[in-house]
Amino acid sequence: MLKAAIILLLLATLTSLFSGLFFLVKDEGHGSRVLGALALRVGLTAITVALIAWGFYSGQLVSHVTW
């Protein structure tokens, strides 16, 4: 369940990234939609990082790195 939530948040972040690019090109930088897309992207990224940290803390995510 946690992994699915992380994947969905990453996809939403990518969608926000490309919508911000679209608004930047379409509005030529004269609008608040680019800023809104940036704020949404930052929020989604913060939630994603928090979920990853929670997953490692709770033991639901584990690292198999040999070092």
Image (cartoon, helix red, strand yellow):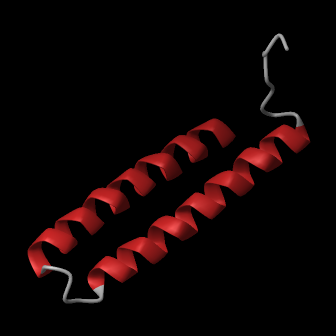
Position of residue 2 relative to residue 41, above or below, is above
Q: Identify the residue shown where x is 30% and y is 89%.
A: 32
Position of residue 8 relative to residue 42, above or below, is above
Q: Position of residue 24 (x, y in %)?
A: 20, 72
Residue that sits furthest to the left in the current view: 26
In screen coordinates, is 33 left or right of 2?
left
In which quadrant of the rendered image does the N terminus lie?
top right
Q: Nearer the viewer, residue 37 or 59?
A: 37
Q: Nearer the viewer, residue 66 or 14?
A: 66
In screen coordinates, is 58 left or right of 26?
right
Residue that sits furthest to the bottom in the current view: 31
Residue 1 seen: no
In screen coordinates, is 23 left or right of 13?
left
Q: Position of residue 49 (x, y in %)?
A: 68, 53
In screen coordinates, is 18 left or right of 67?
left
Position of residue 33 relative to residue 53, above or below, is below
Total count of labels: 0
Q: Nearer the viewer, residue 42 or 28?
A: 28
Residue that sits furthest to the top in the current view: 66
In which quadrant of the rendered image does the C terminus lie?
top right
Residue 51 seen: yes
Q: Position of residue 61 (x, y in %)?
A: 77, 32
Q: Position of residue 58 (x, y in %)?
A: 89, 41
Q: Identify the residue shown where x is 62% and y is 53%.
A: 48
Q: Identify the residue shown where x is 19% and y is 89%.
A: 30
